[in-house]
Amino acid sequence: MGEVKQKSAFDLWATECKALLTKRGNTTYMGHVEHLPWTLKSLEVKELTDHFSTLIGEHFKMKGFIETSYSKNLDVRFRPFKRVQIH
Protein backbone atom coordinates (compact mmCIF):
# COMPACT_ATOMS: atom_id res chain seq x y z
CA MET A 1 0.00 0.00 0.00
CA GLY A 2 1.15 3.48 -0.76
CA GLU A 3 0.92 6.85 0.83
CA VAL A 4 -2.29 8.74 1.62
CA LYS A 5 -3.40 10.20 -1.70
CA GLN A 6 -5.19 13.33 -2.87
CA LYS A 7 -8.74 12.34 -3.85
CA SER A 8 -9.62 12.44 -7.53
CA ALA A 9 -13.07 13.31 -8.87
CA PHE A 10 -13.83 9.57 -9.07
CA ASP A 11 -12.67 9.02 -5.47
CA LEU A 12 -15.02 11.75 -4.27
CA TRP A 13 -17.93 10.30 -6.26
CA ALA A 14 -17.28 6.74 -5.05
CA THR A 15 -16.60 7.43 -1.36
CA GLU A 16 -18.52 10.54 -0.32
CA CYS A 17 -22.00 9.11 -0.82
CA LYS A 18 -24.61 10.97 1.25
CA ALA A 19 -27.60 8.73 0.53
CA LEU A 20 -28.48 5.29 -0.76
CA LEU A 21 -31.56 4.61 -2.90
CA THR A 22 -33.26 1.24 -3.25
CA LYS A 23 -36.53 -0.07 -4.71
CA ARG A 24 -39.02 -2.53 -3.33
CA GLY A 25 -41.71 -3.25 -5.85
CA ASN A 26 -42.76 0.14 -7.27
CA THR A 27 -41.70 2.06 -4.16
CA THR A 28 -38.35 3.89 -3.84
CA TYR A 29 -36.67 4.32 -0.47
CA MET A 30 -33.76 6.54 0.55
CA GLY A 31 -31.45 6.12 3.53
CA HIS A 32 -29.01 8.86 4.52
CA VAL A 33 -25.40 7.75 5.00
CA GLU A 34 -23.27 9.03 7.87
CA HIS A 35 -19.50 8.58 7.98
CA LEU A 36 -16.24 10.43 8.37
CA PRO A 37 -14.25 11.12 5.18
CA TRP A 38 -12.48 8.07 3.76
CA THR A 39 -8.69 8.06 4.01
CA LEU A 40 -7.50 6.62 0.71
CA LYS A 41 -4.06 5.25 -0.08
CA SER A 42 -2.46 4.66 -3.46
CA LEU A 43 -2.42 1.07 -4.63
CA GLU A 44 -0.60 -0.58 -7.50
CA VAL A 45 -2.21 -3.68 -9.01
CA LYS A 46 0.53 -6.16 -9.88
CA GLU A 47 -1.73 -8.98 -11.08
CA LEU A 48 -5.40 -9.09 -12.06
CA THR A 49 -7.57 -12.19 -12.35
CA ASP A 50 -11.15 -11.36 -13.32
CA HIS A 51 -13.75 -14.07 -12.72
CA PHE A 52 -16.66 -11.67 -12.21
CA SER A 53 -17.10 -9.41 -15.23
CA THR A 54 -16.82 -12.28 -17.72
CA LEU A 55 -19.95 -13.79 -16.15
CA ILE A 56 -21.99 -10.97 -17.71
CA GLY A 57 -20.33 -11.20 -21.11
CA GLU A 58 -16.88 -11.44 -22.62
CA HIS A 59 -17.13 -7.85 -23.95
CA PHE A 60 -17.35 -6.65 -20.32
CA LYS A 61 -14.08 -8.37 -19.37
CA MET A 62 -11.98 -6.02 -17.30
CA LYS A 63 -8.58 -5.35 -18.83
CA GLY A 64 -7.18 -3.11 -16.13
CA PHE A 65 -7.84 -0.19 -13.86
CA ILE A 66 -7.84 3.51 -14.64
CA GLU A 67 -7.15 4.32 -11.02
CA THR A 68 -6.91 2.35 -7.79
CA SER A 69 -7.27 3.26 -4.12
CA TYR A 70 -7.36 1.40 -0.83
CA SER A 71 -8.82 2.13 2.60
CA LYS A 72 -8.57 -0.27 5.53
CA ASN A 73 -12.01 0.41 7.00
CA LEU A 74 -14.52 3.07 7.96
CA ASP A 75 -17.58 2.91 10.22
CA VAL A 76 -20.69 3.75 8.19
CA ARG A 77 -24.22 4.21 9.50
CA PHE A 78 -27.50 4.49 7.64
CA ARG A 79 -30.41 6.45 9.00
CA PRO A 80 -33.72 4.60 8.62
CA PHE A 81 -34.86 4.33 5.02
CA LYS A 82 -37.85 6.48 4.10
CA ARG A 83 -40.20 6.37 1.15
CA VAL A 84 -39.42 9.00 -1.51
CA GLN A 85 -41.07 10.17 -4.73
CA ILE A 86 -38.83 10.10 -7.80
CA HIS A 87 -40.08 12.25 -10.68
Image (spheres, helix red, strand yellow):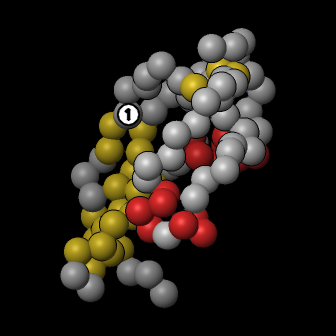
Q: Decide if residue 79 is on the left or right side of residue 49.
A: left
Q: Decide if residue 48 is on the left or right side of residue 66.
A: left
Q: Residue at x 38, y 80 (%)?
A: 85
Number of numbered labels in the structure image: 1
Q: Position of residue 1 (x, y in %)?
A: 63, 14
Dot 1 alpha-carbon crowd within 10 angstroms: few under 14, some 14 to 19, many 20 or more: few
Q: Residue at x 52, y 40 (%)?
A: 49
Q: Is residue 7 above or below residue 64?
A: above
Q: Position of residue 58 (x, y in %)?
A: 54, 67
Name the kind of residue labelled 1 in the image.
Answer: Val
Q: Residue at x 65, y 25 (%)?
A: 46
Residue 73 vs residue 26, the one in the foreground: 73
Residue 33 vs residue 8, the one in the foreground: 8
Q: Residue at x 53, y 23 (%)?
A: 71
Mark 1 falls on what kind of element?
Answer: loop
Q: Is residue 53 above or below residue 18?
A: below
Note whether residue 5 is visible: yes
Residue 84 vs residue 2, the one in the foreground: 2
Task: Please tell me in which quadrant of the rendered image residue 39 appears.
Answer: top right
Instruction: Give the residue number, with chain letter if any, for mark 1.
Output: 76
Q: Position of residue 53 (x, y in %)?
A: 49, 57
